Image: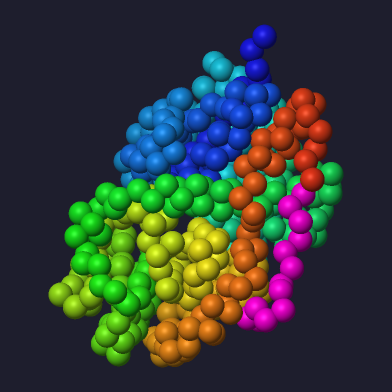
């Protein structure tokens, strides 16, 4: 007898990374057949991300884009997914996070009365303009989901406060923790030639910098890059690696500020194995990425968050991240404090990772099977406890 098919919809690299461990966990449990669907939003990046886990999409949808507008993308993906669900009806659909793909998958499944499982549910910034349009996307998905898999108790509480029944919510942890630990543990050589060519210098400390969000472009990015330049000039023992956004204007802005500066490596967007290895070797991270905020604590690396607000406030509460925005003086001040004081730096992540224990994918697989009556509901991720001595 064939097992029920579960469609896991991925349109961006973060979605692919966070869904990959779920595929492995479902296969290991043997109760469900995972079907990876590439939505067509960022097909090349999805394929590259899945390759890091020795996976390929089972279904690849093609989306024709003319204007690049969100409305065009959403309607095209909904039509493609609706046709897929009609031809090959799944028992449930898993969407991840808050992308346009997530919203398209949730709507297409809901309209065909297919249960929607929302992975990484319950994140809220409270501001529809930041992040845009992600804050609206995740709130809309919550309205049609049958099962809400929250990464943390705070995300769970957000859902309960919005009237989602407690029986429909489970704290699983974030599958990105599973993913990054698995990939970094393989210690693969750097695929990016610029990273591979970096000289190994004893005692040198790596500062990883990522600033990809649209809110960071323009003047905010200028201030961030100026802060990085100041830090490189002030600390002769640090090395900066900055994977740039592929947008030509952003890359030109980065090159204008940092190209040619000693101990600075600017790259194109890097593969997930390269990023995981950089994180595992970093002393400090400056980032506007939500995923990196979740991954860095697993390697004991503190993060300075280059955003005015973050929906991942658990890292702020746990002390493993500080919100600095694009304030040049504040970035330099806080980075210098951690570069000057190793004890202060280590204390930030002494409590561990508030986003998970590396078993989120197994909980997700079991919870999905339980939704279909094929297993019992798993025990939720134990609450994160701030240990004495950790930074607060």
Residue 1 located left or right of residue 52: right
User: Would you identify the image quadrant in which residue 136 lies?
Assistant: bottom right
User: Is residue 356 positioned above or below 387 on the image?
Assistant: above
Q: Is residue 125 visible?
A: no
Q: Quadrant of the C terminus?
A: bottom right
Q: Is the magenta stretch mostly helix, strand or loop?
A: loop
Whole-percent x, y for residue 208 in the image: 37, 69
* Farthest-out residue, top: 1
**Near-viewer residue (32 or 309):** 32
Q: How many labels does the image show?
A: 0
The colour scheme used here is: rainbow
User: Is residue 147 positioned above or below 132 on the image?
Assistant: above
Q: Quadrant of the N terminus?
A: top right
Name the residue: 40% across, 68% down. 282
Residue 308 located left or right of residue 203: right
Name the residue: 19% across, 78% down. 262
Name the residue: 61% across, 73% down. 350
**Near-viewer residue (113 or 319):** 319
Range shown magenta: 380-392
User: Is residue 145 positioned above or below 282 on the image?
Assistant: above
Whole-percent x, y for residue 117 in the image: 67, 38
* Farthest-out residue, front: 202
Whole-percent x, y for residue 16 in the image: 47, 42
User: Is residue 229 positioned above or below 104 on the image?
Assistant: below
Name the residue: 55% across, 34% down. 24
């Amino acid at each position: 007898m064939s097992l029920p098919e579960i469609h896991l919809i991925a349109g961006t690299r973060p979605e692919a990374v966070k869904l990959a461990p779920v595929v492995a966990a479902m296969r290991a449990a043997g109760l469900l057949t995972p079907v990876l669907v590439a939505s067509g939003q960022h097909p090349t990046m999805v394929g590259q991300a899945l390759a890091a886990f020795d996976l390929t999409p089972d279904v690849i949808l093609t989306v024709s884009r003319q204007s690049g507008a969100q409305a065009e993308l959403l309607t095209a993906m909904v039509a493609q997914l609706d046709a897929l669900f009609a031809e090959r009806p799944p028992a449930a659909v898993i969407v991840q996070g808050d992308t346009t793909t997530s919203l398209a998958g949730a709507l297409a499944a809901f309209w065909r009365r297919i249960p929607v499982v929302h992975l990484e549910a319950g994140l809220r910034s409270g501001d529809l303009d930041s992040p845009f349009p992600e804050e609206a996307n995740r709130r809309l998905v919550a309205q049609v989901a049958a099962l809400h898999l929250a990464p943390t108790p705070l995300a769970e509480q957000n859902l309960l406060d919005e009237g989602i029944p407690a029986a429909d919510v489970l704290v699983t942890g974030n599958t990105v923790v599973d993913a990054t630990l698995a990939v970094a543990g393989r210690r693969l050589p750097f695929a990016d030639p610029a990273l591979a060519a970096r000289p190994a210098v004893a005692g040198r400390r790596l500062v990883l910098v990522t600033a990809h969000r649209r809110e960071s472009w323009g003047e905010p990015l200028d201030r961030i890059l100026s802060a990085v330049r100041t830090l490189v000039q002030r600390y002769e023992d640090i090395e900066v690696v900055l994977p740039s956004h592929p947008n030509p204007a952003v890359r030109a802005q980065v090159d204008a500020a940092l190209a040619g500066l000693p101990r600075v490596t600017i790259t194109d967007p890097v593969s997930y194995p390269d990023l995981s290895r950089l994180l595992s070797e970093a002393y400090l991270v400056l980032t506007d990425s939500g995923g990196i905020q979740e991954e860095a604590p697993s390697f004991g690396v503190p993060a300075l968050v280059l955003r005015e607000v973050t929906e991942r406030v658990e890292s702020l509460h746990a002390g493993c991240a500080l919100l600095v925005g694009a304030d040049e003086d504040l970035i330099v001040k806080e980075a210098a404090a951690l570069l000057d004081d190793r004890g202060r730096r280590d204390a930030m992540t002494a409590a561990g990772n508030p986003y998970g224990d590396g078993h989120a994918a197994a909980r997700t697989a079991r919870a999905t099977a339980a939704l279909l009556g094929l297993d019992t509901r798993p025990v939720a991720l134990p609450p994160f406890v701030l240990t004495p001595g950790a930074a607060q």
